[in-house]
Image (cartoon, grey):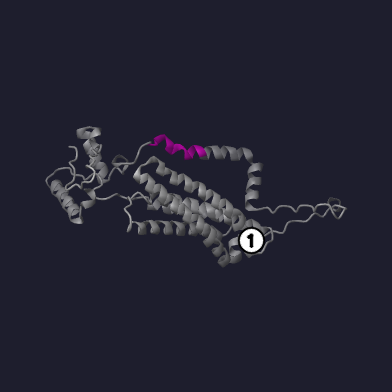
Amino acid sequence: MLTDLTPADRDALEAARTVAEDAGLTAAIGGDVLGIEMDGTLAELIGIALAFVVLALTFGSLVAAGMPLLTALVGVGIGVAAIATLTGFAELGTTAPALGTMLGPAVGIDYALFILSRYQAEVRAGRPLDEAAGRAVGTAGSAVVFAGLTVIIALVGLSVCGIGFLTEMGVAGAFTVAVAVLVALTLLPALLGFAGPRATGRRPRIPAQPTDPAAVPETDDAPAVPAAAPRTLGRRWAEGIARHRRPALVAGIALAAVAALPAASLRLALPGDSTKPADSDARVAYDLISEHFTAGANGPLLVPWPPGTTPTSPPLSPP
């Protein structure tokens, strides 16, 4: 079986390819025998960098921008480490942590944004930092718990399919989301306490009081005049869009059209050797087999072993 191959077996396979190439033959190794090539690290780093820039512009503070990213990475790290530890006590597939590592950063940043945004709103309203943090967790924290529960229920629902690897992915992803909720409710308030005023972004603005005497009620039991809302960055952005709504509409449609261009070459199928880079060994082997033995020859032939037995040798592959 594939899992029974040793590094020496893979080295022997590489040596056989070298011998074939020295003899003037075209040789390429396909399938998963040499391991699964995991690429995409650069794309993840670019995504984190862009998220940091957007958060810095939104909150007006580098410290505040780094907090959601830090809490998200901590949550994913704890979730993946726990899943890796569990493999010492139970058998889990290699795809188990995949869903958690994809959802963890997204929900971790999202949940931290709920609380951090409410925290800055409370500070702008004139509340002390510690009271603002408590109110943010007590109000926005309930939304975080509700959102996390809905995602957890949806992921655990994958077990209804009765497919083993989907159940493992769903449960592992649900655990990672639960960790992200706990981190947002515990670690983020602690970071706010350490950061102090540096996490508040721009200095709070004192709402302007009405100066017109006619605007002040004459009776003592009349409700107080509401103070003018502070002009936050989000409010200024909305006002700017409203003033230039036509150019904003055209720019938004153009941006959406450019972002939708990759959909023209979208492949609705599971990734395989045919989707790998053209110069990779697995892709070369796939193309050679398709060219000389028709495209269907690349399809794997799955032969189940009888229940209760253990295979002593790898099953034969199709020619």
Give the residue displayed 71% in from the left and 52% down from the top.
Answer: 229
Query: For the magenta stretch, what is the residue range?
Result: 256-267
Count of numbered circles in the view: 1
In depth, the one of 224 and 84 nearer the eye is 84
The residue located at (49%, 51%) in the rendering is: 107
Q: Magenta segment, principal secondary structure? A: helix
Whole-percent x, y for residue 23 in the image? 11, 46
282 relative position to 133: left or right: left
- Answer whether residue 58 is visible to the viewer in this image: no
- Who's the residue at 41% across and 47% down the image? 170
Say if 103 sits above or below 250 in the image: below
Q: Position of residue 306 (x, y in %)?
A: 22, 42
Residue 262: x percent and y percent?
A: 42, 38
Image position of 94 (left or right of 298): right
Mark 1, secondary structure of its residue: helix
Query: Could you tell me the amino acid type at mark 1?
Result: Ala
The quarter of the rendered structure image containing the C terminus is top left
